[in-house]
Amino acid sequence: MILFLVIQLLHLLILSPMEFVAYPEFFVYPYLTSSGWLPYRQIIDQHFPGLFFMPVNFFTLGFINPRSLKILSLLLVIFQSALIYRIAKSISSRVYPLIAMVTFALWQPFFSGNHLWLESLISPLALTSFYLWRNATPFWSGAALGAAILFKQSVAFPIFILILITYFRRGFKSALTFAAGAVLPLTLAVCYFGYRGVLSDFFFWTVKFNFLYAVQAATVPDWTVLFKLLLPALLFILALFKSQPKRVVLVLAVWGLILIPGGLSRFDFTRLQAIVPFLSLSLGLLITSLWSAKKYFLFSVILVAQLAWFSIFYIRQENWGQYRFFDQSASALVQTVTSLTSPGDEIFLLGVQPHLYMLSGTYPPGSHFSYQLPWYLPFTQNRILYSLASDPPQYIFYDAAASVDGKPISEYAAPLIQYVKHYYSPISAIGSVTVYESRY
């Protein structure tokens, strides 16, 4: 128990000093939904509605700040570490559970473990589902993975694969029970949106838009990302051949691999977080197997390689102890907005991170919010222009330095910029952000 707690503490000590990143969606969506705005009709988003249904959304807005979300992120990590220990202990009662925890402590930060995003929430749910699946409780295992699909549609793929695996391994009844649990969360969500009268909007943005249009915005990883994945990929492959028992490592591999497609559309380490617990369990089993087989040389090489890989990654970190999106420039911008407006006023943020609405107590014009992303604007640009014309805000804040995937905002949002410059006059600047005031 002492070693268990020491490893947990070590993991916290590794993560806590790193820059914490909670993306603006975690702030602006709860803010707008708590004000009565309707998801998918007034708040445009292409993901399934997990961020709208998160329990944090039902607390007062004072709870939704970067420090509280960092605490939430650390608690999720500790929960996964403890569950990894429990799962590993059910496989082997020797040193494997502690080794698996240490492996998780090394690799979880590497896979953007200091970032809170959708996969940060999918990861503990997928691991919980795996634990329940191993313990032959198919309904609750399916329900845990079904809860994960509320955050990202791509979880439908592992659900489908696991229904098939459950059918062939445990029979039709278990597969049907697993499927029933898996569809329950989404069924409740669909019923809720039907009751709110936005089911067609929900279907368009989360299904039709993603399959027909958003897929065109998928990114291809550059060589640096692939190089950084080289060691964990090689170790994962080695684990398949050198770990014992073979059946267990194969099951771990399947669960990890079927979660990868969710990170392929916008390929980066943040979107691969859900595979890390399964990678850690596999590598922990590899290290334990090598030690048990007295293959000390290979054991030492793998251990040193992991420590070296982690050390290089860790010392290259920047912005220690900071919160991204909440730096001094953001504070200066908030002060400017609050000096010009009153709580409840409408402003328009063009290229500016939208959590500024929450921080300043303001709202987008025309009861409409959508990110100004290149794959959104062909569908939302006219609606934004209509909102600006029918419900013109007094002030607009435009960041000319904003870009997405290397494309400057001047390239993909030209009509919005032209509108701003035609009907508004610049009055001041905060860094790259220009404050515009209505001419009328």
Image (tube, rainbow, N blue to C red):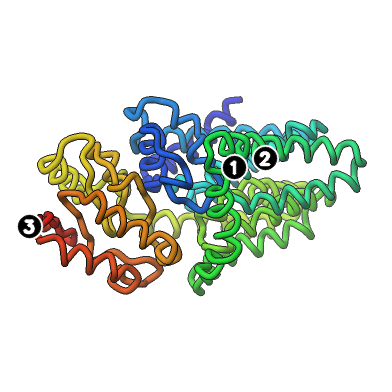
Residue at x-position 40% and y-position 48%: 23
Q: Amino acid at mark 3?
A: Ile
Residue at x-position 79% and y-position 38%: 178
C-alpha separation, residue under disc 1 versus residue under disc 3:
43 Å
Please say whether residue 95 is visible from this viewpoint.
no
Q: Please identify the quarter of the rendering in which residue 413 is found.
A: bottom left
Q: Is residue 198 left or right of residue 139?
A: left
Q: Which mark is residue 146?
A: 2
Image location (x, y in percent) of residue 238? 72, 61
Q: Which residue is mark 1?
A: 150
Q: Are marks 2 and 1 in contact (CB under 8 Å)?
A: yes
Of the two numbered discs 1 and 3 in the rendering, the one whose residue sits closer to the viewer? 3
Q: Which residue is mark 3?
A: 427
Which is more toward the observer, 2 or 200? 200
Residue at x-position 30% and y-position 49%: 325
Image location (x, y in percent) of residue 394? 15, 49
Residue 234 against residue 331 in the figure, above or below: below
Q: Secondary structure at mark 1?
A: loop
Q: Secondary structure at mark 2?
A: helix
Q: Residues within 10 Å of mark 3 (few under 14, many from 20)?
A: few
